[in-house]
Amino acid sequence: MWKRAVVLWRVVRGDARHLWFALRHPAAPGWLKVGTGLLVLYLLSPIDLIPDAIPLLGVVDDLVLIPLAIRWLLARLPAHIREDAQRRAAGPTP
């Protein structure tokens, strides 16, 4: 379980940071919080679309679905929230 979480984090690190900062924005819409909660629930749930017992395919569904879902959520954000989240995720400018 933890190996899967580490691999997923490496794959979606940048988008996950944008999502994190978008969630923390004061004007973040409620649907973003619900969608992110459902995404985390799916990630931690033992129930998958393709069972992990099937070699390789069980992990591939998570490696494909999670990044796609994060990108889908980020693409539907209002422009000012998306830009602010990207700016904050990039870190301080020198």
Image: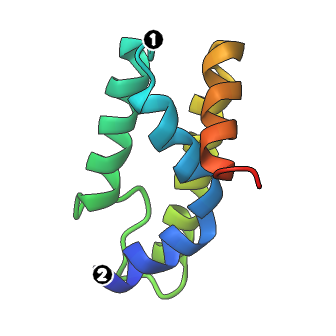
Q: Quadrant of the N terminus?
A: bottom left
> For mark 1, what is the residue?
27
Question: What is the secondary structure assignment of the residue under circle 1?
Answer: loop
Say which of 89 and 36 sits in front. 89
- Residue depicted at x 51% and y 31%: 22
- Crowd rating for badge 2 (residues with CA inside 10 Å; few <14, some 14–19, many 20+): few
- Which residue carries the number 2 mark? 2
56 vs 43: above or below: below
Q: The disc labelled 1 sits on which kind of residue?
A: Ala
Towards the viewer: 48 or 25: 25
| Rendered view: 69 above or below 28 | below
**N-term-proximal mark, 1 vs 2:** 2
The one of 86 and 9 positioned closer to us in this rendering: 86
Classify residue 82 as left or right of residue 5.
Answer: right
| Quarter-of-image position of residue 24 | top left
Please identify the quarter of the rendering in which residue 74 is found.
top right
Residue visible at 32% across and 25% down in the picture: 34
Q: Amino acid at mark 2?
A: Trp
What is the CA distance from the residue labelled 1 to the residue labelled 2?
32 Å
Where is residue 68 drawn, in percent x and y?
A: 63, 46
Give the residue displayed 58% in from the left and 43% down from the top.
Answer: 18
| Percent x, y of residue 40 | 32, 49
Report x, y in % for residue 4: 40, 78
